[in-house]
Image: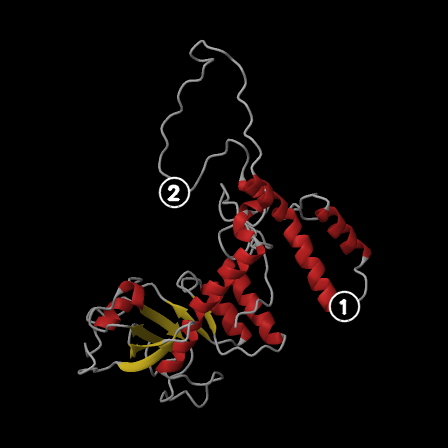
Amino acid sequence: MYYPLHAQPYTPAHHFARGRADPGFRTRPQISAALAGQGKQAGFACRAVVADCAYSVSDDWYLALREAGLPYVVALKPHRGTWAHADEPHTPIDAARALTGTDPDHPGDWTPVERRFRDGHTETWWAADARLGGYGPDSPCRLVVATTDPGLLPGKATWYLATNLPHPDAPHATTSTHPPADLAEVVRVYGLRPWIEQSYKQIKDELGWADFQVRSARGPSTGTRPWSTVPSPSAGTSGSPRSDRWTSPRPSPAPTKAQRGGSTTPHQPQPPCWPRALRAVRAWLTPATTMTRWWRAWTDKDPPSELQALLDAVTTGRPLDLYHRV
């Protein structure tokens, strides 16, 4: 079951006076690690903080989790290099290829683990502790490789996981602040991440957020994901250049009638569109409705005057500037 505890918006660096050097600026990894620490302080048990490879390159993320005393299981990019001796593996995929065993009849270093999916069915995966630089089963940090085929290491069905959960047989397992985890436990923990991602998408669609997301023309806007849920000043102005690299080039517009010497009658406006109008209404109505439900679930008292004034303003169609700071 996936249940969101808290969220914090990410404000891009260009909204701060000193950019990324501004004391108030915080990266997504810093925000996510702080949220995980707050969850622990609130009393929620945490087996490990799980993240994809976008967070594995952030030293701030690791340091924040270490200060909070939280274990982690984070994916590594297969070809991300690290320092090692010339005759040793230098990337996670090289470390996986150095393991022995290629099939169920000759498993070698690989151990079969059962992976359970959201719909209830299970599959047999193969996992192993690999050695890469400072990673190893007897080191504070481990590199666990999980795959459906140890011989082929398919890209979409192979995980390269870094974790500080100690190996059960490691010398420091008894003195570590984190309980040890075998290969099956590491794979199980990281396997929950796709469940959460899918649940997030379903919640987003149910609340209507996906219907009015706006891609920023100046970079990521809000949330820990690169999307903005409401129009904001960071979404650019009319005529601002687009930064969506997936958009194919468009041909130059044909000359207008005025440029060809024809009539200068202004272009007729488009007829009303119900889906567009519905998305516009949801953009300001959904936050107010959600906040009202949360307040009523929390207490039977009336909201403070400031909060009630805010809800009244939003429900009457007055948009909010998410980047307004006092």
Q: Does residue 260 sit above or below 104 in this rendering? A: above
Q: Looking at the picture, which amino acid does disc 1 mark? A: Thr
- Residue 102 lies, in percent from the top left, at 18, 76
In three-dimensional space, the C-alpha distance between marks 2 and 1, rounded to whole angstroms, equals 47 Å
Is 295 displayed left or right of 74 in the figure? right
Q: Residue at x 53, y 21 (%)?
A: 267
State which tag comes first along the sequence, 2 or 1. Answer: 2
Q: Secondary structure at mark 2?
A: loop
Is 295 displayed left or right of 225 in the figure? right
Identify the image quadrant of residue 83. Answer: bottom left
Is residue 76 among the parts visible in the rendering?
Answer: yes
- Residue 253 lies, in percent from the top left, at 40, 24
Tag on residue 245?
2
- Residue 163 lies, in percent from the top left, at 40, 75
Q: Which residue is mark 1?
A: 299
- Mark 2: give few (<14), some (14-19) or many (20+) Cα within 10 Å: few
